Amino acid sequence: MREVAVVAFAQTKHTGHDEGLTEPELISPVIQEVKRLSGLSRFGFTCSGSCDYLAGAPFSFVSALDAVGAWPPISESHVEMDAAWALYEAWVRLQHGDVDSALVYGYGKSSQGDLREIMTLQLDPYYLAPLGLDQVSFAALQASALGADPGALREIVRRSRADGRANPYALDLPDPEDEGYEVRPLHASDVAPITDGAAAVVLAAGDLARELVERPAWITGIAHRIEPHYLGMRDLARSVSAADAARAAGVGKGPVEVAELHAQFSHEELILTEALGLAPDTVVNPSGGPLAANPVMATGLIRIGEAAQRIIDGGAGRTVGHASSGPCLQQNLVTVLEA
Amino acid sequence: MGNRCAVIGVGQTKYQTRRRDVSIAGLVREAALRALEDAGLTFKDIDAVVIGKAPDLFEGVMMPEAYLADALGGAGKPVTRVHTAGSVGGSTALVGASLIQGGVHERVLVVAFEKQSESNATWALSTHLPFNASLVVGAGGYFAPHIREYMRRSGAPEHIGTLVAVKDRQNALKNPYAHLKIPGINRAMVESTPMLWEPIRYLETCPSSDGACAMVLAAENKVTGTPAWVHGTAMRSEPIFRAGRDTVNPQGGKDCVADVYRQAGVTDPRREIDVAEVYVPFSWYEPMWLENLGFAGEGEGWKLTESGATALDGDIPWNASGGVLSSNPIGASGLIRFAEAALQVRGQAGEHQVDGARRALGHAYGGGAQFFAMWIVGSDKP
């Protein structure tokens, strides 16, 4: 495959509440930032990820084009998925060989609705959605199936929140305290917080990437897989699709120094660590991960951005970024980045 | 443009107001199985699935690709969901083709659908984001002023829209999948229908349809049967609120078509393209897009329509299938254009086949006439 690298990454200072910004206002600063970091003002391809249901109106991505400055008209596409999949589409487009750069962005304001209920609408509309099963409840089913040690989950939350406090872009959340169950066995702190935010990435191919930055984060493997929708057709304690994607991306071909995992519930980190075959010495979610900031539709892209930034900054030589979609980790995308 | 890519299978459902006999999953699976059958393949042979549809509010299912993965044989594979407004069907084909052109996969299933009977599209199109103005008008109310501006600029006589409405419905009578079939359709019939949004009458608009369309795309080494080779692909987008944007003859459309013509080596589209499937949801968009796509000079498109050049027996048939005016499962409408273009160059369009069609244009647009997706397919290997 053609050599393609992440050369710039930017994210908003995510907030746990609505700051009154429109989506273009939310996105514009991060677009400007990656243009400044990469030195590029036009891109061969642009792709974004967002979800109409967060805003409760169709075409939420239409007004986002105002923030991109799509004039003269640009070659552009959009996925109604986490923007990590927009990055995948851009990576594929760069494989054609006729364009050398791509802009990818994603954004979400989950403060505007009730995310728990909204995610119910993602289920099979005939057999599952009418049951009213909400996002935290189906995550709790998975946590129960895993039977995770409560102490291990508590430690994941504590570590994620501490790392988040040290990350200027993540929320400032306290250490978890004794609390009742949100939905047994999950506590409120096991659930990723409601977050508004956006992120952008610039991809560049071959020599252009080398010209733009000293240490491009080369994408040496990227793959995604989905598995059956019905929870009853899956072993919820394992993630077959994450394991398959990790194999296809070549995670196991070398040591992984840092892994940024799209775990929106503490127990998902355990399932994903196992599925990706990560060694005990791999540092997981040093940014704090989704448990410290979860701007829905950008969270997966941020995982890839954070993993890439470790390489761009010279702090690591081989990292993994992971993104997920669908109920109980139904769909997973794995990216391997190398110096 | 990357590696060669070809269409080796096409599948469509019958388009109609309500498909009460199938679920959403049943609808997309019907189209997918027909495309696979056409290609002589099964789900097992497919490397990846790309799903497209217009806003999720149209059915009330958020990110339905999660739920549809099973019905489309997606488990264990990469599944991608595309959404680029009304152009999404076209974009879905292009994202699928890109996977092959980029050398990532060898056989890709692309599927697009809308099941409009599950909800109310005009309502879904009229809600708005907080702090943004609501147009509360649906698509027809949005595009009617653009059409009036076209009439003012070009001096087109008022009956041109009627001619398109009649011509496309006559074509639909020859298409077994078309939704609107109006035997004896004529100008008087169109002109007798109510005015919805001046100058658009009821029979000058597209219907609301349930339906799905699917294609199997293949890399050169997996091509079987009679392929439709992809000669060019392009997407363009421009901002909806940019001051000074020409919404009647958008720059994005001109740039997009220039890009596909360049890739396909087309310099005189009227002469070199044999048939075009163009997204015409309101009758007047035929003359408007004739100009935007370079088939006629500025202000001259309506003369081409009036002369009969775009009829099935004209020198450049547009929408031989009956087009969006005859079938409109919104999210699929763009993919149907792309698929019908492929059927024409494969010589498999049946009664609405344009004799000797060797090169065809598929076109889709969306949003406020700001998103464009196009491809050119041909019977010859590029």
Image: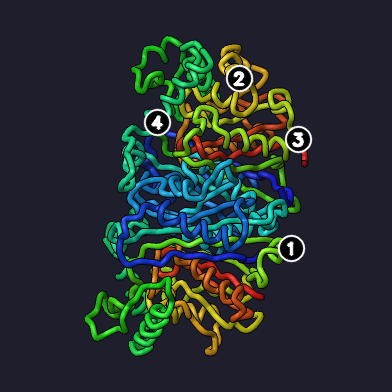
How far apart marks 4 and 3 lie (CA) works out to: 35 Å
Residue at image location 36% in from the left, 88% down from the top: A149
Q: Nearer the viewer, mark 3 or mark 2?
A: 3
Q: Earlier in the sequence, mark 4 or mark 3?
A: 4
Q: Amino acid at mark 1?
A: Asp
The residue pinned by badge 4 equals: B142
SS type, badge 4: helix
Residue B192 horizontal/vertical position (percent):
37, 12
Residue nearest the observer in this picture, B341 or A75: A75
Q: Quadrant of the C terminus of chain A?
A: bottom right
Tag 2 residue: B310
Give the number of the mark in front: 3 or 1: 1
Residue A252, how many percent across, how many down? 62, 80
* Image quadrant assignment for residue A311: bottom right
The residue mark sitting in front, 1 or 2, is 1
Image quadrant containing the N terminus of chain A: bottom right
The residue that disc 3 covers is: B265
Q: CA distance from mark 1 to mark 2?
A: 48 Å
Question: Position of B221 compared to B351: left or right?
Answer: right
Residue type, label 2:
Thr
Chain for mark 1? A
Q: Which residue is mark 1?
A: A207
In what element is the residue under mark 3? Answer: loop
Q: Write down the chain letter for disc 3.
A: B
Q: CA distance from mark 4 to mark 2?
A: 26 Å
Of the two numbered discs 4 and 2 in the rendering, the one whose residue sits closer to the viewer:
4
Contact between marks 4 and 2 (CB within 8 A): the answer is no
